[in-house]
Image (spheres, helix red, strand yellow):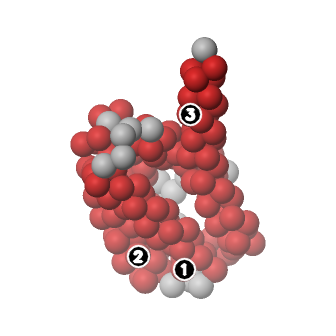
């Protein structure tokens, strides 16, 4: 029984870590760009632009799903495929962290769009790799790809309109 308790504690710690990492990335990124939302709201917006409060709500959900997906991969036996998947995951998180800085703080709308395309590709590779290890983990990443596609639309048209 004692071994089962240790195993459960380890899995709980792994889950909490897997959730904390992307949520932490999002929180720090949001903190660094919080003042720029005023500037964003003054920009000419394309059709379908949601109100500002939608972005942190959606991102929080996406980061939680990413964290859960990474947990499902992290608890599988150590293999080269798992290592590759978690490495891709870490890289895409770092790239994700920088996009709002480029877009909001620097106002580099075209560069941010190109960066977002790079991020989309990394997330696609990560999703594909996750799904080879855990189908559920792959499915949990799909809303992230959909949202990045929508973000790309917004980013590109903000570049064109401003």
Please state if 116 lies on the left or on the right of 61 as rendered.
left
Residue corresponding to mark 3: 11
Do the residues under discs 2 and 1 have CB atoms within 8 angstroms? yes
Q: Residue furthest top?
A: 1
Q: Position of residue 11 (x, y in %)?
A: 56, 33
Nearest the eye: 30 or 133:
133
Describe the element under mark 1 as helix, strand or loop. helix
Residue corresponding to mark 2: 115
The image quadrant that residue 29 belongs to is bottom right
Describe the element under mark 2 as helix, strand or loop. helix
Q: Position of residue 149 (x, y in %)?
A: 36, 57
Residue corresponding to mark 1: 102
Nearest the eye: 82 or 159:
82
How many other residues sit within 10 Å of disc 2, few (<14), some (14-19) or many (≥20)?
Answer: some
Q: Position of residue 101 (x, y in %)?
A: 59, 76
Please state if 72 lies on the left or on the right of 118 as rendered.
right
Q: Position of residue 68 (x, y in %)?
A: 50, 39
Q: Is residue 15 above or below residue 36?
A: above
């Amino acid at each position: 029984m004692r071994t089962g308790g240790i195993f459960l504690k380890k899995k709980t710690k792994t889950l909490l870590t897997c959730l904390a990492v992307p949520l932490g990335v999002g929180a720090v990124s949001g903190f660094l760009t919080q003042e720029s939302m005023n500037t964003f709201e003054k920009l000419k917006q394309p059709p379908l632009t949601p109100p500002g409060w939608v972005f942190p709500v959606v991102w929080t959900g996406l980061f939680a799903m990413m964290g859960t997906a990474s947990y499902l991969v992290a608890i599988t036996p150590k293999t080269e495929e798992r290592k590759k998947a978690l490495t891709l995951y870490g890289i895409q998180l770092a790239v994700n962290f920088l996009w709002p800085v480029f877009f909001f703080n620097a106002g580099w709308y075209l560069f941010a769009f190109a960066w977002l395309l790079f991020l989309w590709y990394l997330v696609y590779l990560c999703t594909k790799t996750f799904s080879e290890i855990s189908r559920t983990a792959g499915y949990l990443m799909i809303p992230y790809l959909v949202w990045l596609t929508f973000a790309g639309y917004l980013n590109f048209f903000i570049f064109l309109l401003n």
